[in-house]
Amino acid sequence: MKDGIIIKKYNSYYYVQGETSVIECKLRGRFKKNRYSLCVGDKVQYTLLGDETGIIENIFPRQSVLLRPLIANVQQVIITFAAKNPDFNSSLLDRFLVLAEYSELDIIICLTKIDLLNRAEIETLVQEYQKIGYTVIKVSNVSHEGVEKLTSLLNNKISVFAGPSGAGKSTLLNRINPKLNLKTGMVSDKIGRGKHTTRFSELLSLPEHGFVVDTPGFSLTEFNDLDERAISECFPEFNKVEGSCKFNSCLHLHEPQCKIKNAVDHAAISENRYQSYVEIMDEIKKTKRGF
Ligand SMILES: Nc1nc2c(ncn2[C@@H]2O[C@H](COP(=O)(O)OP(=O)(O)OP(=O)(O)O)[C@@H](O)[C@H]2O)c(=O)[nH]1
Ligand SMILES: [Mg+2]
Ligand SMILES: [Zn+2]
């Protein structure tokens, strides 16, 4: 048997990246009886039936499962936002960050289109997030600045690229590996028709061991089913505040003597970030009430 990783699923076929080629595989019957469903990213063992066909015999335990999009064994998310066109939206970035933190993924923020904004404004954006402790990589797909630096952080990992439609995810992946030849689209067309250029998920190989997943914009922004008590832990700077709130169960909203609100008042936590927290908490409450 040989080891491989599922890079694509189509009807009842699984495409497994072997050592040198992609093998079209079916699943052993006993898995079907258990209704066991495999997904992209699953690590498997297969036997070859022909040169390019095989059968999956074994599935290795998953290290992680990302639900939207459904991919196993993802280690890292590259949250991709444009500095301009579409305009930078920190509240939307915070939503992506919370969902990535909630899924316990390693996070890199990638700021694209830095050729469209002046240096001073870019630094203001970048510093707000670096201050919290996030790695921020600045990229231009026009001048290629920053592309090499980002590429070096992708080796030997499965990384998912997420971010709004038009941020430049597919363009960036094409820069990283021109062989991918992913479809890209004009921002004005995307907004006009509300369409995303990228539609489904598959693992794409990088030249230096590693896989990336290109996702359609907005695939990571739903807060259904999240536990409201866990949201504050998804804000790393909240966790760093010393001391404690008056109430153990404090949600840092309207409660008195709250260390988080106190930190906001003293500018130890930024107003913007706290506002994002409040918005997300509101949204979770509304979903729970069935709106
Ligand atoms: N000026 C500039 N334009 C860029 C840059 N990166 C991407 N673009 C342009 O932005 C547009 C959108 O790029 P895409 O790569 O399709 O965006 P996407 O994030 O994959 O969008 P979806 O697939 O819809 O989620 C294209 O017209 C690109 O040429 C950049 O660094 N600078
Ligand atoms: Mg795309
Ligand atoms: Zn509190």
Image: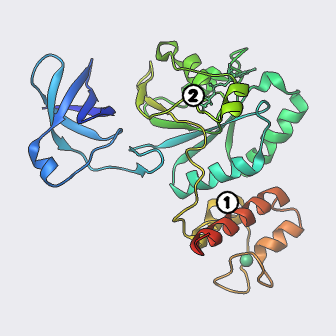
Cβ(mark 2) to ligand 1 < 8 Å? yes
Instruction: Give how far across and how far down residue 24 sits, in percent.
Output: 22, 25
N-terminal of the pair, mark 2 or mark 1, is 2
Of badges 2 and 1, nearer the viewer stands 2
Q: Residue at x 88, y 27 (%)?
A: 118
Name the image quarter holding the N terminus: top left
Residue 17 shows in the view: yes
Badge 1 is on which residue? Answer: 235
Quadrant of res 108: top right
> Would residue 31 be found to the left or right of residue 232 on screen?
left
Is label 1 in a helix, a strand or a loop? Answer: loop
Instruction: Give how far across and how far down residue 275 sits, in percent.
Output: 79, 62
Disc 1 marks a residue whose amino acid type is Phe
Residue nearer the viewer, 150 or 271: 271
Q: Residue at x 51, y 30 (%)?
A: 154
Quarter of the picture for ligand 1?
A: top right
Badge 2 is on which residue? Answer: 197
Q: Look at the numbered discs 2 and 1 and tell me whether their residues touch, using CB distance below 8 Å.
A: no
> Would residue 41 be found to the left or right of residue 208 on screen?
left
Q: Residue at x 23, y 38 (%)?
A: 44
Residue 166 shows in the view: no
Q: How is the image coloured?
A: rainbow
Is label 2 in a helix, a strand or a loop? Answer: loop
Disc 2 marks a residue whose amino acid type is Thr
Name the image quarter holding the C terminus: bottom right
Crowding around mark 2 (Cα neighbors within 10 Å: few <14, some 14 to 19, many 20+) is many
> Would residue 224 be found to the left or right of residue 90 on screen?
left
